Amino acid sequence: MITRAGAVVAGAAVVLLLAGMRADYPELVMLGLAGVAALVVAGVWMLTRPRLAAVREVSPSRVQVGTSAYGVMTVANTGRRRSPPSLVVETVAGRRVTVPLPSLAAGDEFETVYPLPTGRRGRYVIPALTLGHTDPLRLFQVERAGSGESVLYVHPRVHRIAPVPVSGPREVEGATSAGSPQGGVAFHGLRGYQPGDDWRRIHWKSTARNGTLMVRHNAVPDEPRQLIILDTSAKPYDNESFEEAVQVAASVCVAAGRSNFPLACRITANPAEGDGSGDSEVTSALDLLAGAQRSTEDRGLPALTDLVRDAVATGECAALTIVTGRADPGQPAILAAMRRDFPTVTLVRIGRTEPSSPSAVAGVFTVDARTSTEFAVRWNRLFPL
């Protein structure tokens, strides 16, 4: 493929040749022929392509906005001849990053580290490396795909806040549910004997009464679960307030992680808990929030019933935190429904609050703030770290 410089040389050569022949000016013809010769030599040079193998890793693969992330590239010359200087092109968040490669002897490797843009929150899929081969004058360039794609998560900024107040059992003999893991010390009920059950768990009185072996079903006691939901509908926000709301949701998730309670984060645009890509619940939550975007097709808070259905069905004790933007006339009814199913409900509204905004529902703790920083200050005054 001819480059911009090559196109300029080709155009200039044609103009010089035509002008020199028409004006009978041999010097112009010589300059035109020089341009043609440069293009021919560059074309011959491009016939010999280097055999390079490139591998790229992103380190670290998860960073906070503004924190450094790097691409670590290793290039090896797998051919039998020395490779000429080449280029590797990366595309991250729509920005092209060009990495020059030196000439490599046969069998040699070259490793380089280069910064990746992390100025904006997001989940960035970095396409396969593009290996570029060009001539010394950069008149032609050929590109081919290299190694596979990588993913860079740029997490939202997080404010240090106190965990959401949670009520519920945390002691060893706490409450259990049908979904509780087996093998704990809390008694959940009796069930029929199954091969492999410990004979010491046989409940002899029930066995004698029923005529079949009955064993104690012990389970791990339920712990209060924290469910954080971010409203990703477009109506309650502008661009700035939505980013602030994402930071609030991320801050609540990190604070919940420090409390060591089970955690789930969801967005109204997608009822799934996340992509499960993280190695912990907090990391998975931040991965989900990294890619959260406003949508005009998102139902917003009216979708809460579907989002919390599974938590309500299992009967688990859960603390619900909802992060949204400007108040909507339908909020009180929605929050009243949530208050019936969750012992603790917290509503955080980010952005400019209108004087006519509906008041909070009784039993729902409400925090209004214009920015995530203001939210953190108000929250920590109420619940000191």
Image (cartoon, rainbow, N blue to C red):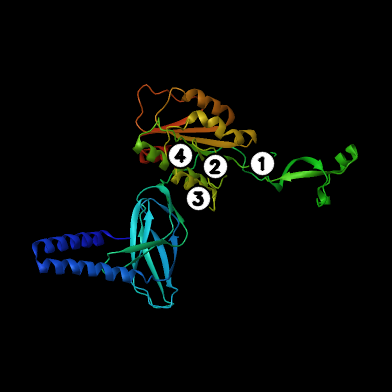
Q: Earlier in the sequence, mark 2 or mark 1?
A: 1
Residue 264 position in % (x across, y down): 54, 42
**Rendered residue at 24%/61% (across/down):** 5
Q: Earlier in the sequence, mark 1 or mark 4?
A: 1
Mark pair 1, 4: CA separation = 25 Å
Residue 26 shown left or right of residue 363 in the figure = left
Specify the quadrant that holds the C terminus: top left
Mark pair 3, 4: CA separation = 24 Å
Q: Which residue is mark 4?
A: 383
**Rendered residue at 24%/69% (across/down):** 38
Mark pair 2, 1: CA separation = 26 Å
Residue 168 shown left or right of residue 22 in the figure = right
Residue 150 position in % (x across, y down): 46, 56
Q: Which residue is mark 1?
A: 174
> In the rendered structure, which amino acid carries the disc numbered 4?
Phe
Q: Can you say whether 321 is above or below 113 in the image?
A: above
Q: Residues within 10 Å of mark 3 (few under 14, many from 20)?
A: some
Query: Could you tell me which secondary element the residue under label 1 belongs to?
Result: loop
Q: Which residue is mark 3?
A: 283
Q: Nearer the viewer, residue 329 or 362?
A: 329
> In the rendered structure, which amino acid carries the disc numbered 1?
Gly
> In the rendered structure, which amino acid carries the disc numbered 3?
Thr
Residue 212 can be seen in this image: yes
Residue 347 position in % (x across, y down): 46, 32
